Amino acid sequence: MAITQSAKKAIKTSKTKKAQNDITRAKVKDALKGARLAIDGKAKEKEILEKLAKAYRELDIAAKKNVIHKNKASRLKSRLAKSIKR
């Protein structure tokens, strides 16, 4: 257990940041799943583009917040775009 005041504060802030990062990761996961389901389900083009834009947005936000690495975000966006072409 933390003894000093600064260590106690560090524990508290790390818990808060973890909770925020978990929310961001969940948003990314949901957006990616929605986009993949729309692509695989042969949804209308407009719906696919909307889901894709949402997924791109969530990936960019997560990368900007350093929740995921920027190269990972780029890789996932590239794979989504590639799957549309198929």
Image (tube, rainbow, N blue to C red):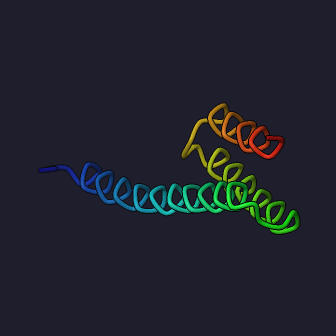
Residue 2 locus on image (x, y percent): 16, 50
Residue at the spot x=59%, y=58% of the render? Answer: 33
Residue 56 locus on image (x, y percent): 75, 52
Residue 31 locus on image (x, y percent): 63, 60
Relative placement, left or right, of 40 versus 52 is: left
- In this orientation, which residue lies closer to the viewer: 9 or 20? 20
Q: Report the label total.
A: 0
In the rendered image, the quadrant that contains the C terminus is top right
As drawn, 79 above or below 40 = above
Relative placement, left or right, of 11 versus 61 is: left
Q: In terms of image quadrants, where is residue 55?
A: bottom right
Q: In terms of image quadrants, where is residue 51?
A: bottom right
Residue at the spot x=44%, y=56% of the render? Answer: 17
Q: In terms of image quadrants, where is residue 72?
A: top right
As drawn, 47 above or below 60 = below
Residue 5 locus on image (x, y percent): 24, 55
Task: Determine the residue located farthest toward the right in the rendered image.
Answer: 46
- In this orientation, which residue lies closer to the viewer: 74 or 51? 51
- In this orientation, which residue lies closer to the viewer: 61 or 37? 37
Residue at the spot x=40%, y=62% of the render? Answer: 16
Residue at the spot x=62%, y=54% of the render? Answer: 32
